[in-house]
Image (tube, grey):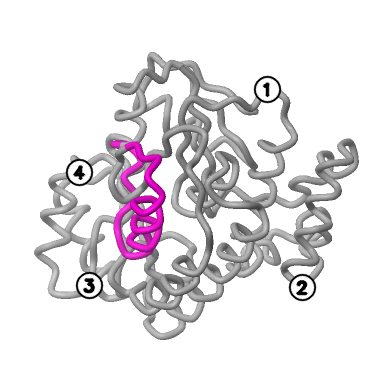
Amino acid sequence: MTAYIFPGQGAQFPGMGESLYNEHSRAKELFDRGNEILGFDITSIMFSGTADELKQTRVTQPAIFLHSVIVALTADSFKPDMVAGHSLGEFSALVASGALDFEDGLKLVSQRALAMQKACELNPSSMAAILGLDDSRVEEICSSVDEVVVAANYNCPGQLVISGSDQGIEKACELMKEAGARRALPLPVGGAFHSPLMEPAREELAAAIQSVTFKTPVCPIYQNATAAPSQDVDEIRKQLIVQLTAPVKWTQSVQAMVRGGATKFIECGPGKVLQGLVRKIAPEAEVESL
């Protein structure tokens, strides 16, 4: 069985999607439609903008979504048995599997990006990658810090991203190093994604998600908040709202997909980050790009 996986923020690069736009008429139509929906020329930033321009949350999230979804929708070989996406990538997976239409998906991603940006500005906060400690030890240290700091991204065994207030991250990183972490590396992000500090964004996005029509996807989607497969529209909608303040259970999702029969993982979108993570989680699986 084949699992298609969709990347999140951080996979962007200058020039992303340009060859697809130039070589495929359907891709060009969808990119041009994306510009109309967003109300600005995102393709010019994707194709010829700088890395710094691409890093702006309002640009990054819809850019990765567009690239990922258009790769899937224009590929004759796209026939998923199951799908999953890392954080933002969950929206791409929902559109590619038919649970959301292209326009609604892009509007939600744009609203999500702006809501997250606002939440970041309300609370000085950040994230850090912890390498070389067991998940349970990282969780234990986070809970011992007298600040908001939580496990946010379970990326692969021995790599967990924490999220919280600036002071919380600073204290936690010191304690992680003392506990034997190989690295405790602050990340260049604008705020504490997948933490309680995203609550204002969750509330804002919840109303938008509730107003959109969801359909039954063509295959199960393994959602970040549960790491469990679902084709139930109400459950999908509910967990998509929970996702903003809950951890991304990527390790657990890949393990669950393998238990569900996945032997091949195909990454749809820019970069190869997820392929590297899958190789560490499920070394027996076949991994490639679409």
The mark that comes first in sequence, 1 or 3, is 1
Disc 1 and disc 4 in contact, CB within 8 angstroms: no
The mark that comes first in sequence, 2 or 1, is 2
Eyeballing the image, is 100 above or below 262?
below
Q: Which residues are magenta?
A: 229-252
| Label 2 neighbour load within 10 Å: few <14, some 14-19, many 20+ | few
Q: Quadrant of residue 150?
A: bottom left
- Decide if residue 197 is on the left or right side of residue 271: left
Disc 2 and disc 3 in contact, CB within 8 angstroms: no
Tell me the residue at 57%/35% (across/down): 272
Q: Which mark is residue 148?
A: 3
What secondary structure is found at the residue carrying circle 1?
loop
- Decide if residue 84 is on the left or right side of residue 177: right
Q: CA distance from mark 1 to mark 4?
A: 36 Å
Tell me the residue at 38%/71% (across/down): 202
Q: Residue furthest bottom?
A: 122
Q: Which mark is residue 135?
A: 4
Residue 207 visible in this rendered orientation of the protein: yes
